[in-house]
Every structure is written in C-alpha cells, then in structure tokens.
Image: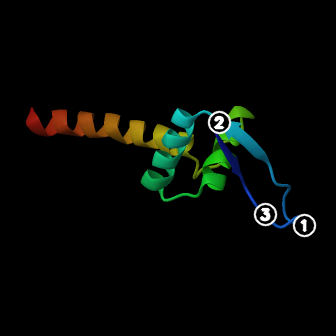
Amino acid sequence: MFVLGATVAKEERPSVTTRVPQDWFEQIEAICIESGKSRSEVFQEAIAAYLGKHPPHSVSSLAKRVATLERQYKKLTALIVS
C-alpha cells in the first residue's frame, strides 16, 4: 500500500491522506498520466462523483460527452455511407 495525500495551504482547503492498494495506485497514476491531471485533481473528482457533484470538466462528465459524440458520429457515418 502507498500513502497518498494532497498538500494544500491550510487557509484554502484541508489536506486528506489515505492508503490504497498497489493496483489502485497504479490505476490512479495511469489516469494522471492520460489526463494530465495531478493526483489531487483525480482524487477530488472521484470524491465529487461519490458525493454526486460533477463539475463540467470532471472525468465522468467528459466520459458522458464522449459517449454522446461517439453515438452522433456513428449516426453521421451511417448517413454518409448510405
């Protein structure tokens, strides 16, 4: 297990530290690399999703937008090919 935490100035937001299994850590690191986001940003988005708060730039919101675009793309492709 690894200890992960965010260090933020006390006047802005409190800091939270947690332990996660190795495989979670590796998945989190992969998400950070793919998205260009910090661990703190990824954790904040995960907690926001758990709490039902989805900012427009979050991974879950972007995933929904990508799924919508993929459906639209398939429809357009079908129109062009027909």
Q: CA distance from mark 2 to mark 3?
A: 20 Å
- Please tell me how crowded label 1 is: few (under 14), some (14-19), or many (20+) other residues with Cα within 10 Å: few
Mark 3 sits on what residue? 8
Residue at x-position 48% and y-position 37%: 64
State which mark lies toward you, 2 or 3. 2
Tell which residue pokes out farthest to the left in this image. 82
Q: Which mark is residue 20?
A: 2
Where is mark 1, residue-wise? 11
- Position of 46 compared to 65: left or right? right
Residue placed most toward the observer, 80 or 7 = 7
Picture quarter with the C terminus: top left
Q: Are marks 2 and 3 in contact (CB under 8 Å)?
A: no
For the residues labelled 1 and 3, the Cα–Cα distance comes to 8 Å
In the rendered structure, which amino acid carries the disc numbered 3? Val
Image quadrant of residue 49?
top right
**Disc 2: CA contacts within 10 A as few (<14), some (14-19) or many (>=20):** few
Residue 65 spot, x, y in % from top left: 46, 42
